[in-house]
Amino acid sequence: MNKRPYLVDSHCHLDRLDLSKYDGDLDVALKKAKENNVGQLLCVSIDLEAYPAMLELVRPYPEVSVSVGVHPNQSECEEPTVEGLVKLAQDEKVIAIGETGLDYFRSDGDLDWQRDRFRVHIEASRQTGKPLIIHSRNAREDTLTIMENEQAEEAGGVMHCFAEDWKTAKRALDLGFYISFSGIVTFNSAESLRDVARKVPLDRILVETDSPYLAPMPFRGKPNEPAYVLHVAEKIAALRSLSFEEVAEITTENFNRLFTG
């Protein structure tokens, strides 16, 4: 890695990467990330069945931390409990709870189970003191209402892969949450999101890939990977009239303050 300040990919799924161009070798993908100034990564859990293998996959890499939790769209899976999440979160690799939240885009019908699961994660986060990673899609009002009612601000966290409006961002910020931007902010159709990126206080911004999903321009439509968080940071720098170095330093400091400070 060269001497430019390093970035943190604050949300990726290393156990789900398309490693075909790297001959199936995660080492090579992480080396490519380092060449693109990515010095830390947070590998995010989406279900408890895959969690043990995910944890062991990344355990050899000191630059990779993990979360533990169950994605709101996972329906046929082991249901998390507060006690179970708290126990799993004791591992030294675990720095966050989630991803959790609400998703009314991919799920329909009676979604009380999603809302109940979200509350379980919030309570586990409060008990462990480890921040929440929140996913919200087509559910902004319910997401924020549950966060407010369940005192999510006591543990804090991040609105991951943010793609909502400024009003939603402001409510999350008022709860002490951070806002994380993914490759979506580079899409030609995302001008309203870029307006949010211009307004979020600099001490609350994170960058992520959500890889292997949502590759930024110019890779849109292809498998995403942690190396591409560079393009998200460069877009934020352009929107805020900052240098890449400034954005790298700011977002890395923000990540460490939230998750490891």
Image (cartoon, rainbow, N blue to C red):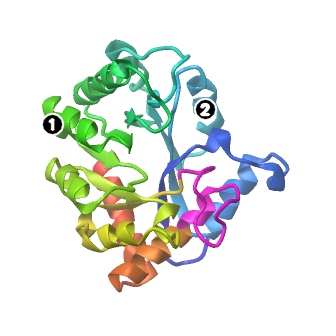
Q: Residues within 10 Å of mark 1 (few under 14, many from 20)?
A: some
Q: Is residue 141 left or right of residue 191?
A: left
Closer to us: mark 2 or mark 1?
1
Residue farthest front in this picture: 109
Q: Is residue 223 left or right of residue 97?
A: right
Establish if 254 lies above or below 15: below
The stretch in magenta equals 210-229
Residue 50's disc number: none
Q: CA distance from mark 2 to mark 1?
A: 31 Å
**Residue under numbered circle 1:** 148
The percent position of residue 158, horizontal first and vertical second, equals 32, 48
For image coordinates 44% across by 68% down, the residue present is 190
- Secondary structure under the numbered disc 2 in the rendered image: helix
For image coordinates 55% across by 71% down, the residue present is 231
Which quadrant of the view contains residue 227?
Answer: bottom right
Residue 54's disc number: 2
For image coordinates 82% across by 50% down, the residue present is 20
Question: Would residue 118 be seen by someone viewing this image from the given angle?
Answer: yes
Establish if 109 lies above or below 215: above
**Residue 45 versus residue 76: which sits nearer the camera?**
76
Which quadrant of the view contains residue 220?
Answer: bottom right
The percent position of residue 64, horizontal first and vertical second, equals 53, 46
- Secondary structure under the numbered disc 1 in the rendered image: helix
The percent position of residue 40, horizontal first and vertical second, equals 50, 55
Which quadrant of the view contains residue 179?
Answer: bottom left
Q: Residues within 10 Å of mark 2 (few under 14, many from 20)?
A: some
Earlier-in-chain disc, 2 versus 1: 2
